[in-house]
C-alpha cells in the first residue's frame, strides 16, 4: 500500500470516529445537569440537531449598561436551579468600570416575586476588538413552580 | 504571483458574501420559524461550552477563565508605499491572528477578601503584516498584529474602595485598556482608530498593545458622573523583539516614567437619556527624547501630548423596557504633540456607529471611521535629508460591519482606504479589504 492510500484510509477512519462521537452526543436530549458535555462534539451535533429550549422561560433584560446576551436556567444534579449565562457591556455604555452587579428575579405564574438574588460580575475586555463580557452563575434557593419565569439583568455596582 | 494574490483578494470577497448568508441565521435558535439555507448556529455562550461543567464550578469558587481567538485575512487591492524592484506597488494578502487566554480571580469568592481581584492574560501572536510588506503606513492596518511570539499580557492586582468609587490596579498593565478610548472605537480594526498614532507613532516603546508594563493606576468615579484616571508606567519599555515574551520587567531611573491622565464626565449615565462621555487627557514621558528627535541640534527632556475625546449617542429607537433596538452614535478624538520631538504633531479622528442596523440583528454594528495623522515638518525635513520624499498627512477611512453570528462568534468584513499611506506625498492611495473572525472558547 502506498503512502497516499494509507493517508486516505487514516482520514476516513478519523472521520468515522468523529461521526460516531457526533451521533452519540446528538442523543443527549434535554439538558438536565450542568455536568453535561457541550463542547466541540456537541457543537458539531448542534449543526444538525436544534438546541433544546430552556426549561424555565427567561427574561433577559438589557440595561443602558449591560446586555444579558444569553442565559440558562437548568436543574442541577443536586436538584437546585442554576442560572448562568453571559453578560456583555452595551455598545455605547459609559465606561463605568468593570465591577457590576447581576440581579436574578424569579416570578411566579401570576407575576409575583418568589425570589431575588444578586451576584458580582466583573466585566473586562481581554483585548482589542474583544467584547467586554463575563460569565455568570448563581443558584436559586428553591425550585420555581411550573409557569414561573426568571428575569436576569445587570447594572453598575 | 500578483495574479494569485488578486485571486486571494477575490476569495476574501467570497467569504464576505458567505458572511451575508450567515446573517440570515436568527440570533436565538428557539425563534427559528422556517427553513434556512445554512444550518442554525448553536447559540451557546462559548464554543467550548461549559468545559463539561468545569467553568461554572470554577466560577462559583471565584475563578473566571477566558480564551479568545482572533484571525484575519487582509489584502490590498491597490496602492501602498512600499514598492517592488520595478518601482511598482505590490498586491499582498496576509493572515495574522491572536490567541488570548487567561483568568480573573475574584478574591472575594476565593478567600473572602472583598473587592479584590487578580487578573492575568497570555497572548500568542502570529502571522504577517500588510504594513510591513506593502502599505508602509503609520496607522497600522490591524490593531492585533504584533511580533510573532507568545508573551505575557496583563498581570495585575486590583482593589476597589468606597463602594467601587475608587479602584487601584498594580502590576503589569496596558495603557490603552483604560485610557484614550471611547465607547465605540473598540469595534474598528485599523490600528489608529484604536490606539491612535499620537501615541503609537510618537511613543513606539510605550505601554501599548502588546507590551504590558509595570504600572500603578488609579480610577476615581464618585457618583458615576465625573471621573479621574491616572497611571504611572515604567518608562523603559523595550521593543517587542527584545523583550520577546514580556517576562522581563524593566524599570530604570534613567528611562523615566510614562504618566497618563484623563479627566471627564459621563452624560445621562443615570437617567436613561442618551449616553455620552467627554474627557480631556494627556501623556507625559519623563525620559530624554534626544535619540528620537528630528532636529539633531535640539535635545529635550521629556515628551508630552494632550487631546480631547467625546462620544455621544444621538438617536435611539424607543423600545419596550429591557429590549435593545437601533441606535446611532458619533465620536471624535483630537490632539497634538510637540513637532520637534514627535513624528505625528496633530491627530484627529471621528466616526459614526449604527447599532442594530438591520431588523432582528440587535447585536450587529455598522461603523464608519476616519483618521488623519499630520506628520511634523521636522520629521519631513529629516526624511528628505535622508533621501526620502517629503511627508505630509496620512488619512484612512474604515467601514466595517460587526456580524454577531452567535454569542461566541463574530465575523467582521472590513474596508479601508488610505490617502497617502506613510504620509509620503508620492505614496499611492491604497484600498484594503479584509475579514476578521473572533471566537470565544
Image (tube, rainbow, N blue to C red):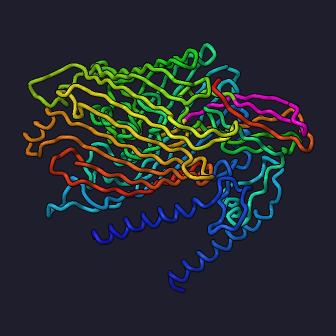
In the figure, A150 relative to B6: above or below? above
Classified by dominant secondary structure, the portion drawn in magenta counts as strand
Q: Return the x and y of residue B77 as percentages of the image width and height.
A: 31, 61
Q: Is residue A143 visible?
A: no
Residue at image position (75%, 28%) is A118
Along the horizontal axis of the image, is A125 left or right of A110?
left
Q: Quadrant of residue B63?
A: top right
Between B317 and B335, the one lying in front of the other is B317
Q: Return the x and y of residue B297 as percentages of the image width and height.
A: 8, 25
Between B52 and B313, the one lying in front of the other is B313
Along the horizontal axis of the image, is B162 left or right of B6?
right
Residue at image position (29%, 24%) is B305
Q: Return the x and y of residue B287 as percentages of the image width and height.
A: 26, 21
In the figure, B213 relative to B440: above or below? above
Q: Quadrant of residue A60?
A: top right
State which region is magenta: A102-124
Q: Return the x and y of residue A39 as percentages of the image width and height.
A: 68, 55
Residue at image position (63%, 52%) is B360
Q: Is residue B330 visible?
A: yes
Amino acid at each position: 500500500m502506498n503512502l497516499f492510500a494509507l493517508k486516505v484510509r487514516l482520514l476516513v477512519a478519523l472521520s468515522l470516529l468523529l461521526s460516531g462521537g457526533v451521533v452519540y452526543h446528538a442523543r443527549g436530549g434535554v439538558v438536565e445537569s450542568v455536568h453535561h458535555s457541550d463542547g466541540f462534539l456537541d457543537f458539531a451535533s448542534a449543526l444538525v440537531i436544534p438546541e433544546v429550549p430552556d426549561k424555565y422561560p427567561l427574561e433577559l433584560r438589557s440595561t443602558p449598561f449591560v446586555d444579558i446576551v444569553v442565559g440558562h436556567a437548568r436543574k442541577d444534579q443536586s436538584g437546585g436551579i442554576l442560572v448562568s449565562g453571559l453578560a456583555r457591556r452595551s455598545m455605547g455604555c459609559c465606561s463605568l468600570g468593570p465591577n457590576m452587579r447581576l440581579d436574578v428575579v424569579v416570578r411566579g405564574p401570576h407575576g409575583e416575586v418568589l425570589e431575588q438574588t444578586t451576584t458580582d460580575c466583573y466585566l473586562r475586555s481581554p483585548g482589542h476588538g474583544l467584547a467586554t463580557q463575563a460569565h455568570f452563575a448563581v443558584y436559586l434557593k428553591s425550585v420555581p413552580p411550573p409557569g414561573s419565569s426568571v428575569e436576569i439583568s445587570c447594572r453598575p455596582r | 504571483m500578483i495574479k494569485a494574490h488578486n485571486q486571494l483578494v477575490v476569495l476574501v470577497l467570497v467569504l464576505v458574501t458567505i458572511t451575508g448568508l450567515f446573517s440570515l441565521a436568527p440570533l436565538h435558535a428557539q425563534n427559528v420559524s422556517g427553513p434556512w439555507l445554512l444550518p442554525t448556529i448553536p447559540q451557546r455562550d462559548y464554543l467550548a461550552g461549559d468545559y463539561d461543567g468545569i467553568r461554572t464550578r470554577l466560577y462559583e469558587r471565584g475563578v473566571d477563565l477566558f480564551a479568545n481567538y482572533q484571525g484575519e485575512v487582509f489584502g490590498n487591492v491597490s496602492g501602498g508605499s512600499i514598492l517592488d524592484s520595478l518601482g511598482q506597488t505590490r498586491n499582498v494578502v496576509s493572515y495574522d491572528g491572536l490567541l488570548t487566554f487567561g483568568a480573573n480571580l475574584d478574591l472575594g469568592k476565593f478567600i473572602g477578601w472583598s473587592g479584590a481581584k487578580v487578573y492575568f492574560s497570555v497572548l500568542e501572536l502570529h502571522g504577517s503584516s500588510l504594513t510591513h510588506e506593502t502599505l508602509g503606513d503609520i496607522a497600522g492596518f490591524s490593531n492585533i498584529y504584533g511580533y510573532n511570539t507568545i508573551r505575557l499580557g496583563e498581570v495585575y492586582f486590583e482593589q476597589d474602595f468606597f463602594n467601587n468609587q475608587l479602584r487601584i490596579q498594580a502590576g503589569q498593565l496596558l495603557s490603552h485598556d483604560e485610557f484614550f478610548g471611547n465607547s465605540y472605537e473598540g469595534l474598528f480594526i485599523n490600528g489608529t482608530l484604536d490606539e491612535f498614532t499620537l501615541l503609537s507613532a510618537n511613543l513606539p516603546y510605550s505601554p501599548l498593545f502588546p507590551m504590558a508594563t509595570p504600572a500603578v493606576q488609579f480610577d476615581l468615579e464618585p457618583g458615576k458622573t465625573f471621573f479621574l484616571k491616572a497611571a504611572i508606567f515604567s518608562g523603559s519599555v523595550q521593543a517587542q523583539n527584545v523583550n520577546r515574551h514580556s517576562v522581563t520587567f524593566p524599570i530604570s531611573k534613567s528611562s523615566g516614567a510614562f504618566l497618563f491622565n484623563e479627566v471627564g464626565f459621563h452624560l445621562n449615565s443615570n437617567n436613561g437619556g442618551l449616553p455620552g462621555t467627554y474627557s480631556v487627557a494627556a501623556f507625559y514621558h519623563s525620559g530624554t527624547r534626544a535619540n528620537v528627535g528630528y532636529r539633531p541640534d535640539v535635545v529635550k527632556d521629556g515628551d508630552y501630548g494632550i487631546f480631547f475625546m467625546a462620544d455621544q449617542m444621538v438617536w435611539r429607537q424607543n423600545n419596550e423596557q429591557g429590549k435593545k433596538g437601533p441606535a446611532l452614535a458619533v465620536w471624535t478624538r483630537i490632539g497634538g504633540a510637540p513637532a520637534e520631538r514627535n513624528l505625528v504633531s496633530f491627530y484627529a479622528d471621528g466616526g459614526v456607529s449604527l447599532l442594530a442596523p438591520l431588523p432582528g440583528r440587535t447585536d450587529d454594528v455598522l461603523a464608519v471611521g476616519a483618521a488623519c495623522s499630520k506628520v511634523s515638518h521636522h520629521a519631513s525635513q529629516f526624511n528628505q535629508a535622508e533621501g526620502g520624499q517629503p511627508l505630509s498627512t496620512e488619512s484612512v477611512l474604515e467601514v466595517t460591519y460587526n456580524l454577531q453570528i452567535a454569542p461566541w462568534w463574530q465575523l467582521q468584513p472590513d474596508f479601508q482606504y488610505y490617502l497617502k499611506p506613510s504620509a509620503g506625498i508620492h505614496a499611492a492611495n491604497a484600498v484594503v479589504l479584509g475579514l476578521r473572525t473572533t471566537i470565544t472558547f
